[in-house]
């Protein structure tokens, strides 16, 4: 039985591993607004996290194979899953941990700044849904898709948070800094998650 | 597609620990507006109607089996359900877009297993009447059928702070 299997079967072990990971993360001590990069020792996948003004953003790589597996598990045809897996995909978590009041964000305002200075928006789920309509995606699949994606806009009171998949139209392995924004009491705030990169396709390994 | 990849994706989707539910309280909604309609069948085919639960405090939870925080918070919902009086409190957990077999396959793995009604919103038509942008989202409906509290993202529903909020709603007279 692999370590992964143990973690999956025994949530208490996973929770302990999470706590250990969090303790290690605290030891690494990223300052206010700074990016804390971590690598999962079991999977080799990387994640990036930053906290600023009580707002936490975390991106975790999803490999093309993981994206395929998720959507095939939701009934997608292989070609449909492949269409999604071709994008640069992250599991994304945004949390109003300790901001003094409600925050609001619009994913359309976030930009991936590439090494050559281009500023690229995320591919919103509304854009995906238009493509799925053109491909006649079955309704049940479309529902699973829509609700698995990171909401395009949201308002969070302190304690609220969300988790979902975000995509960028970038080649596998691309590196970028993510400039993300939110408002609090009509004041625009922003921060940068540095050194993010899209996962490589390891399905042939 | 390898089994290892599927295992990995399950682990990744279920194992994100940075977004722990913690003991964050539910958010009071200020002016309490009437809850939208919610009429669906549960997994046993029994019709359920939120409007028929006036006089009870009701937790309405929108969820899916593939949603990691939804999966994590459900055992705490069952513990909450067991700790509050049945004649004054109810939970309606509304599954989005899945079938009864998928729901049963998931709930059978839970400890404690849910005994509250699990509703099926196969086409997400009921969900779209509610102010929901992501899963999970939960609302607490007061005894007069109004939205009183809300939670965006998973919560630890049997934490002392959330339990106290619900007891206060159950006991309120306004």
Image (cartoon, rainbow, N blue to C red):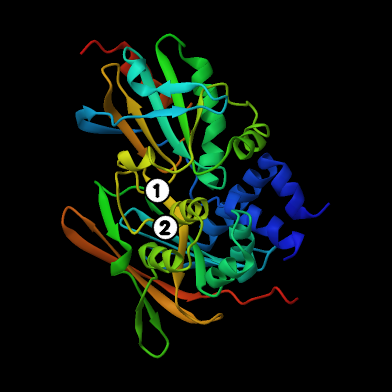
Q: Image quadrant of residue A83?
A: bottom right
Q: Which residue is mark 1?
A: B134
Identify the residue position indicated by label 2 in the image: A150
Classify A153 as above or below B172.
Answer: below
Q: Which class describes the residues within 10 Å of circle 2: few (<14), some (14-19), or many (20+)?
A: many
Q: Is residue A141 above or below residue B166?
A: below
**Contact between labelled residues 2 and 1, with CB atoms less than 8 Å apart:** yes
Q: Identify the residue at image location x=52%, y=82%.
A: A171
Across and down, in percent, residue A41 comes to 68, 64
Seen in the picture, residue B146 relative to A158 is either above or below; the reply is above
Task: Name the chain under label 2.
Answer: A
Is residue B53 visible from the viewing direction of this image?
yes
Label tally:
2
Residue A135 appears left or right of A76: left
Quadrant (top left, top right, bottom left, bottom right) of the C terminus of chain B: top left
Question: Does B66 sit left or right of A56 as displayed?
Answer: right
Report the Cα–Cα distance between label 1 and label 2. 7 Å
Secondary structure at numbered mark 2: loop
Residue for point 39% across, 70% down: A123
- Classify B8 as above or below A63: above
Q: Position of residue A55 (x, y in %)?
A: 35, 55
Label of residue A43 in the image: none
Locate the N terminus of chain B by quadrant.
Answer: bottom right
Residue A131 at x, y percent in the picture: 43, 69
B160 and B16: which is toward the camera: B16
In front of the other: B173 or A30: B173
């Amino acid at each position: 039985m692999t370590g992964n299997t143990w973690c999956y079967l025994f949530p208490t072990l996973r929770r302990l591993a999470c706590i250990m990971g969090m303790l290690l993360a605290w030891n690494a001590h990223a300052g206010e607004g700074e990016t804390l990069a971590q690598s999962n020792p079991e999977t080799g996948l990387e994640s990036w996290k930053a906290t600023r003004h009580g707002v936490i953003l975390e991106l975790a790589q999803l490999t093309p194979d993981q994206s395929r597996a998720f959507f095939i598990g939701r009934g997608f045809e292989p070609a449909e899953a492949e269409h999604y897996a071709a994008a640069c995909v992250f599991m994304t978590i945004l949390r109003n941990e300790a901001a003094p009041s409600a925050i609001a964000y619009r994913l359309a305002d976030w930009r991936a700044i590439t090494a050559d200075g281009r500023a690229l928006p995320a591919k919103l789920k509304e854009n995906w849904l238009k493509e799925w309509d053109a491909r006649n995606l079955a309704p049940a699949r479309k529902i699973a898709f829509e609700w698995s994606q990171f909401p395009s806009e949201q308002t969070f009171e302190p304690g609220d948070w969300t988790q979902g998949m975000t995509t960028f139209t970038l080649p596998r392995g691309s590196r970028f800094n993510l400039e993300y924004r939110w408002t609090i009491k009509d004041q625009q705030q922003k921060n940068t998650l540095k050194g993010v990169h899209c996962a490589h396709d390891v399905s042939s390994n | 597609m390898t089994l290892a990849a599927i295992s990995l994706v399950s682990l990744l989707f279920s194992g994100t620990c940075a977004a722990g539910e913690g003991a964050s309280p539910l958010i009071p909604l200020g002016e309490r507006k009437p809850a939208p309609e919610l009429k669906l069948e549960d997994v046993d085919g029994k019709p359920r109607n939120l409007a028929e639960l006036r006089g009870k405090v009701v937790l309405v939870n929108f969820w899916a089996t593939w949603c990691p925080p939804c999966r994590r918070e459900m055992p705490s919902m069952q513990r909450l359900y067991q700790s509050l009086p049945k004649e004054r409190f109810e939970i309606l957990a509304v599954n989005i877009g899945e079938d009864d077999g998928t729901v049963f396959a998931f709930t059978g793995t839970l400890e404690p297993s849910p005994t509250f009604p699990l509703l099926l919103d196969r086409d997400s038509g009921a969900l779209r009447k509610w102010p929901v942008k992501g899963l999970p989202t939960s609302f607490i409906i007061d005894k007069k059928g109004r939205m009183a509290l809300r939670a965006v993202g998973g919560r630890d529903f049997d934490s002392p702070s959330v339990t106290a909020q619900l007891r206060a709603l159950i006991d309120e007279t306004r």
